Amino acid sequence: MLGSKAFEPNRDIDSPNRNIAPITSEINDSEKLLVGGCQLSELAKKYGTPLYVFDELSLRTACKTYISSLKKHYPGDYLPLYASKANSSLAICAIIASEGFGLDAVSEGELLTALKGGVKGENIVFHGNNKSRDELFFAYQNNVTIVLDNNHDIELLKNIASEGKPAKLMLRFTPGIECHTHEYIRTGHLDSKFGFDPDQVESVLQELKMYKWANLTGLHAHIGSQIFEVQPHVDLAGVMADTLKLARKIGHPIADLNLGGGLGIKYVQEDNPPSIDKWVEVISKAVVIACSERNLDLPRLMCEPGRSLVANSCLTIYKIGAKKIVPGIRTYLSVDGGMSDNPRPITYQSLYSSCLVDKPLDSNCEKVTIAGKHCESGDILLKDFSLPSCESGDFLAVFGTGAYNYSMSSNYNRIPRPATVIVGDGCVDLIQRRELPEDLLQLDVLPDRFITNN
């Protein structure tokens, strides 16, 4: 259970990815949990539940730590990019842009959100293994760097880009590097849907050199996510430096080397991810050494943190409802959300930490299983979890829900998506309104012939 240990003053203020709770978490005189100077139970009463709560200081601190670490450890130019698939909203895009970040997007929706949120097109890269013509055209028109993932991208761009306005491109390839993480999020091995195979790279580089509309300025590779190891990124730097040397030899003005993201975070006490600074130090030194050994000028270093920026900056508040005791087996506590607002437990068997927001220090615990309200027996948020005695109507906080919760949420069982607020210095702002049941009908069309006059 997450108890008083999470709120000790010596928590890692400079690396939010190593904290379970947001860095502004504190207990007030009434022994109730506050984040950003706001009492969570009061937020729940005002905005309803489930409720995503973002801590602005945690997010900004993570951004600043990446920037300061790159400045300290990398002697060349750099540009960190927010992997917006983790959580895309106008407010988050505005914050990361104000902190000096660029952004990577994988759809026209993410591109539009980033642009409307204040991220400049020239600081955005556009990923995807099956981009549509419309998406590519939108990216091209907005001066976004397009990541070539396969020959399909090239064929579509032939009819979009022109010699008068060459498309700024980055080439993605699979480096063949394994890392120990969940099978579904390992994207760097050879059997992957992403990127060109290594044996295709030279021929693609030669082909692109023939096209005056193609301005290849960068290389990209990504080896996975929720990674606690650092050695795979050292290996990655060497592989990418070899490809950089080849591309420049062929005549491409490669200026950017994008090593992707993947730094893990602390979801439960047993997790021990590297700090942001350590991760940046490792990849920076690896690129410097790899380029030096090959007599290459240093490229602009890009990386794509997502989870390590937003996950621990956010928590979700639920209201506890029904209680079911299966004698000798398990006690179920049901909450008013579940797999529609957090699909990660049922999808990846992901683990989380939690506490009662008005009893965060209570150590008189019982073993319970926190169940979602959806019509699936696998809709379990926390299994066999220690929690103080509670009643229907109590509020529960689940930590580390800023990444891949809202962005992967759904309307399963026609349940509306939660609201999101951002807190700081005792102030709270709504950044995503709660969906209402009637919102779910806006895209439905009922043909006249189905309407009966009973």
Image (cartoon, helix red, strand yellow):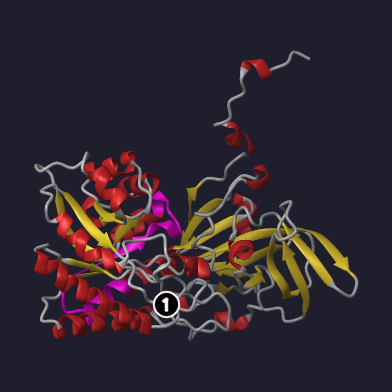
| In this view, 447 is above or below 318 | above
Which quadrant holds residue 342? Answer: bottom right
For residue 83: magenta? Answer: yes
The residue depicted at 50 percent of the width and 62 percent of the height is 402
| In this view, 131 is above or below 55 | above
The answer to whether 84 appears left or right of 54 in the picture is left
The residue depicted at 58 percent of the width and 78 percent of the height is 268
The answer to whether 38 appears left or right of 391 in the picture is left
The residue depicted at 15 percent of the width and 67 percent of the height is 247
For residue 406: magenta? Answer: no
Query: For the view shown, which residue lies furthest in the top direction?
Result: 453
Check the picture and name the quadrant holding the N terminus. Answer: bottom right
The answer to whether 116 appears left or right of 404 in the picture is left
Which quadrant holds residue 201? Answer: bottom left
Look at label 1 and name its amino acid. Answer: Glu
- Tell me which segment is drawn in magenta: 66-91
Task: Name the residue beneath numbered marker 1.
Answer: 178
Check the picture and name the quadrant holding the C terminus. Answer: top right
